Image (cartoon, helix red, strand yellow):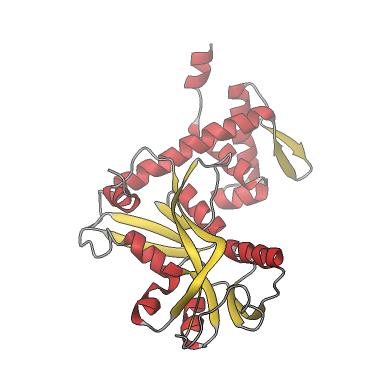
Amino acid sequence: MRTERLRRLNFRHLHYFWVVAREQHLTRAAERLHVSQSAISTQIRQLEEELGHALFLREGRSLQLTEVGTLVLGYADSIFNLGAELMETVRAGEGQDLPELRVGAVATLSRNFQQNLLRPVIGDEHLHLVIESASLAELIERLRVHRLDLILSNRPVTSDDHVALSCRRLDRQSVCLVGPPRAGRPFRFPDDLPGTPLLLPGRSSEIRSQFDLKCEELGVVPRILAEVDDMAMLRLLARDSGAVAMVPEVVVQDELGQGLLQKYGEVPDVHEHFYAITARRHFRSAALKAVLGET
């Protein structure tokens, strides 16, 4: 009996259910699928009949998954995400002159770190490299539907009910104070902080949180000249403003090497962590393996 029921499973019914469950609203699902709400309701009702269980609790205009509906959604996520992976993998070998590696980078991430990590594939004439910048939430959604192969982030993530993610720490960078080359006595931490104009990452930054906790622990009130979320802008201000900036060393590696900036010292107990986030896929390209140092 169970085999007969599975044979009657209609994947169009399952797809309609999947979209409604993701949208949690019939109207939005109908707009996305370009069909009427009554058509969707009919398809879901037929799926419920095939499975022998209700999938939604209808509360006014909102829809809540039943226990069985939550179970079915997990399977539907796997089925349709695997289908998207199949299409992307096949398309990568057909109709394209070059295979693609699509990388998403959190907008606040150091450009130097990105360049260092992607160095194994930068300039590869046999690869089309695409780099996108956005918030971590936006990038995870693109990864979920296989529009990205890799996310570079300074924050870790965990898998959720809708997408299985792999998050691996790539590196840990020291955070330092840098400024114009100094003559005379060296910068003294933390004694010189209160009288020194500082350029700091924005309050949403993890290293800013660590720095604030360190200052509170030391009983120091720093003099903040500017707070900057974007590391590229922080790098420019550190180079051109004459103020002292707190940044991961990798951000200003070129300016330090050229003598435009001087490293005054590392900030104790403050580090930035870098992560590679990928979807758990059946296939990984040679380019992705090269970037992640996999054989």
Residue 266: x %, y % from top left: 51, 68
Compared to 67, does 271 lie above or below?
below
Compared to 179, does 34 lie above or below?
above
Residue 29: x %, y % from top left: 61, 48
Observer-nearest residue: 46 or 195? 195
Count of marks, rendered view:
0
Q: Residue at x 52, y 88 (%)?
A: 241
Q: Residue at x 57, y 39 (%)?
A: 18
Observer-nearest residue: 35 or 243? 243
Q: Most extreme residue toward the right, as rendered?
A: 60
Q: Most extreme residue toward the front, as rendered?
A: 185
Q: Do we see residue 208 in this rendering?
A: yes
> On the rendered structure, is 136 left or right of 285?
right
Task: Find residue 117 and report its image quarter.
Answer: bottom left
Task: Find residue 126 and report its image quarter.
Answer: bottom left
> On the rendered structure, is 208 left or right of 145?
right
> On the rendered structure, is 141 left or right of 82?
right
Residue 99: x %, y % from top left: 27, 54
Residue 137: x %, y % from top left: 56, 56
